[in-house]
Amino acid sequence: APILAIESSCDETAVAIIDADGVLLANQISTQIDFHARFGGVVPEIASRKHVEAIVGVVDAALDEASRALGLEGGPLAPTELAAVGVTQGPGLVGALVVGIAFAKGFAYAAGIPLVTVNHLEGHLFANLLDSPDLEPPFIFTLVSGGHTMLVHVCAWGDYEVLGETLDDAVGEAFDKVAKALGLGYPGGPVISRLAKEGDPHAIEFPRAMMHSHDFRFSLSGLKTAVITYIDQQTKAGLVIHLPDLAASFEAAVFDVQYKKAAEALRATGVRSYCLGGGVAANPHLRQMLTEKLERDGIRVHLPPVSACTDNAAMIAMVARRKFAQGDFASFDVDADPNMTL
Ligand code: ATP
Ligand code: FE
Ligand code: MG
């Protein structure tokens, strides 16, 4: 029977339904971005309230979509026709997570089916399975999202060795802060990557922090400051800022370090396979550059579908399916864990 999965860790209320073979039957998402954009970032209080407003409708839409995908007559799937409910436990905003968890508990209890909790970061990893269902560890995984930047040695599913993380800002956070400094709105990633397409990545020399640190740690706050300083200097001197060149040069500084460290991690572990995840993995330049360079190094590269890089429930469903098959169920008194790590 199918599994229903709920994601509500940040500003997306998402529900997916997946069958036992991993085929997606439904994939619904209700985004709150417009409500947060005017504040330049996610406001936790608004996020919680919007999840409460959206969740019933998104679950209903998913049950309806799944029924149509299965060619069933007679309306939406019934909760009792499901095998289990999966839900994101963390990391994320606590007030947003609890909405999904409370709903999932009530839904599972009423339907008499098990509850499965999912680590959101493992979800970003499992997004790779949506296009590469046969992907098998070991591989090196780069997570670049709004809240995390890590290099991980995936020894086996569920067995993760975190090689290094960011010391300060996450990559997605740097995109968002640079966009905010330029008055380009929230989120920053999509608009910066659109601008970068027309720009010269060599136009401005920005620092590549930790590039030669011979470890797997990252630092983004210096680059962010360098970009903001550049903007201030140009503005004070009365010079126009060429946005495409700025965007392309910023991206190049971020992505050069990402390639260098990924290549070093692959060399250090002797692993020959690589995958990427998190919202920044939607960036076309990062996808293209990593694929080209790593394949030239003889590495097999896997990427999640662009639509499954930012937060979604399909990736949560992929993890839930695996945990369900292992009988790894959660107790009904489980709580949100806003600081969960891999
Ligand atoms: P986490 O997963 O660490 O808890 P999150 O769920 O908030 O954080 P995601 O939804 O995975 O983060 O990713 C959102 C981030 O991805 C934002 O910072 C956004 O700017 C960035 N992003 C989205 N699209 C792009 C893109 N095309 N290029 C670069 N960054 C992007
Ligand atoms: Fe995320
Ligand atoms: Mg998001």
Image: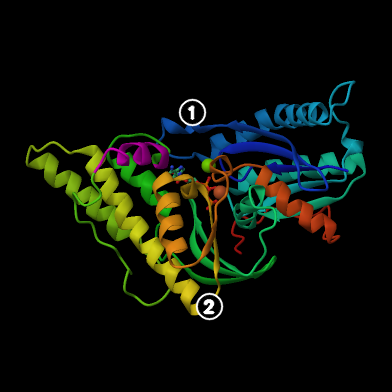
Is the residue at mark 1 in contact range of ligand 3, meaning its CB lies under 8 Å from it?
no
Choose top left, top right, bottom left or bottom right for residue 69. top right
Q: Is residue 300 visible?
A: yes
Disc 2 is placed on an element classified as helix
Q: Where is residue 10 drawn, in percent x and y?
A: 57, 43
Cα gap from disc 1 to disc 2, whole angstroms: 43 Å
Tell me which label, 1 or 2, sits earlier in the chain. 1
Mark 1 residue crowding within 10 angstroms, few (<14) / some (14–19) / many (20+): few
Q: Which mark is residue 269?
A: 2
Residue 34's disc number: 1
Q: Secondary structure of the magenta portion, mostly?
A: helix
Quadrant of the image containing the C terminus: bottom right
In this view, the residue in front, 32 or 277, is 277
Tell which of 190 and 39 is nearer to you: 190
Residue 297 is left or right of residue 276, and the answer is left
Q: Residue at x 50, y 29 (%)?
A: 35
Q: Residue at x 38, y 44 (%)?
A: 176
From the top left corner, tell me how far across and down residue 135 is, in percent. 66, 59
Q: Which coloring applies here?
A: rainbow
Identity, as a three-letter code, of the amino acid under mark 2: Thr
Residue density around tag 2, few if under 14, some if 14–19, many if 20 or more, within 10 Å: few
Instruction: State left or right for residue 94 relative to residue 203.
Output: right
Q: Which residues are magenta?
A: 189-199
Extreme top residue here? Answer: 74
- Across and down, in percent, residue 206 comes to 23, 56
Find numbered disc 1 in the image and state the secondary structure of the residue it sits on. helix
Q: Amino acid at mark 1?
A: Asp
Residue 216 seen in render: no
